[in-house]
Image (cartoon, rainbow, N blue to C red):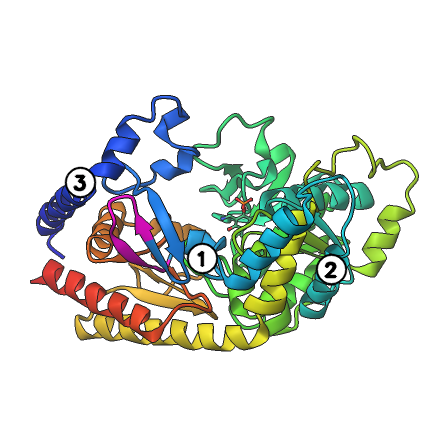
Amino acid sequence: MDRGRLTSLLARERDSQVRRNPRSAAAYAQADHLFGRVPMTWMNKQAAGFPLYLESARGSHVVDLDGHEYVDLCLGDSGAMAGHSPAPVTEAVMRRLATLGGATAMMPTEDAEWVGAELTRRFGLPRWSFSLTATDANRWAIRLARAVTGRPKILVNSYCYHGSVDESLIVVGDDGEGVSRPGNVGAPCEVTLTSRVAEFNDVDGLERQLAHGDVAAVLMEPALTNVGIVLPEPGYLDAVRRLTRRHGTLLINDETHTLSAGPGGCTGAWGLAPDVVTIGKAIGGGVAVGAYGLSAELAAAILDRDDLDLVDMGGVGGTLAGNALSVAAARATLEHVLTDSAFAQMTALATRFTDAVTKVIEAHDLPWSISQLGARAEYRFVRPAPRDGTSSARAADAELEDYLHLYLANRGVLLTPFHNMALMSPATSAADVDRHSEVFAAAVAELLA
Ligand code: PMP
């Protein structure tokens, strides 16, 4: 690839985005009262130097403040995996807010038990509790794991992402041991005091770390999804379960993104047997909700402990967690939108997406790859697809990513800013996928011309 050509095409696409979006650019320029000019600092991850502002969204499409319509393959990085404002969720939210009233009242509603039972059907774990984010589900699962095992450390995979969880900001260093993740903001203590790390797909590395006997839980995605998609090799997840059991370590599967694998995420699709599942984002159909599920044995062991304050200020809890509005939204999403049959259709579309990208990669003999996990797929600038987080992180190419993101956005297709990821919702159509295929092929052809 001619890097000079990439740089000049990127500049052209940046200019084009600036010219096409004067209202978004102006809104950003005027946002003096926001830290970093955005509602949340990650919204500054934008190739053109300002974010596109949202005007409206329905199904698989969004419209920006300047009136451009996009095929949305980002879907709020999974938060809108159900599609934007699906009718059953809108109705359930309106019913709760307007008809019945009472979004949050420090009182349970019957929807919560329905959602718990449905999550049990999907993931196998029988006892559920709610949060508002996947981050908090992970935080509280970690606390429970420490409490019940009496061990101090959490093990994660290098270049994982589980939200802003202190214990997870660790990567494998040059000597094979853990070091703080670059950029870690205000760590409460040296991360190696709280954490251990192993590469994904590295059974020996995992065993070496667990052998210290101080790991309360392994917190992992069954497939990495935040550094490209890194799929498990045959036997790896079985080995993880065998080793965690042997070393008295709990296993937490974070299914926040890997829900894409099917109605019960990878846990359901691959018959996994974790002690805890954590989840968030998609299950609220766009409304904030997270959840964690515990095995019966683990739930009983925790509830039996008189010394743990689970009710007041002991460290697990959020005032709005499990609120009436968020569980109403989760119920509508799981009952009517992200259903078993919806997943079959979403996965078929992701396969259509993957096939089209593969054709382009092969036609130009590019050293790129694409990995699919059910309803989501992601391309990476290395071939074969990486087998662990560190090698996948090394394959990042910021300039190339920015070029593709801008080229696609300027022609009506949105990818997730932090990924080359495409996610299918129940509202996504074959025409949506084909629009990406066409524009992606054109972007590559222009780059290589
Ligand atoms: N777990 C995983 C696997 C994630 O990808 C993310 C967010 N990308 C989170 C947890 C945290 O989700 P949230 O930011 O909604 O808390």
Kindly report which numbered mark, 3 or 1, lies closer to the viewer in this rendering: 1
Residue 294, can we see it?
no
Q: Which residue is mark 3?
A: 18
Give percent across and percent down for residue 130.
Answer: 70, 49
Give percent across and percent down for residue 206.
Answer: 61, 54
Disc 2 marks a residue whose amino acid type is: Gly
Disc 3 marks a residue whose amino acid type is: Val
Judge whether 51 appears above or below 99 on screen.
above
Label 2 Cα neighbours within 10 Å, binned few <14 / some 14-19 / many ≥20: many
Asked whether residue 200 is drawn in magenta, I would say no
Q: In this rendered view, identify the residue nearer to me: 324 or 362.
A: 324
Q: Which residue is mark 2?
A: 116
Give me the C-alpha separation between circle 3 and circle 2. 46 Å
Q: Residue furthest top?
A: 33
Give percent across and percent down for residue 359.
Answer: 24, 75
- Where, by quadrant of the figure, is residue 105 drawn? top right
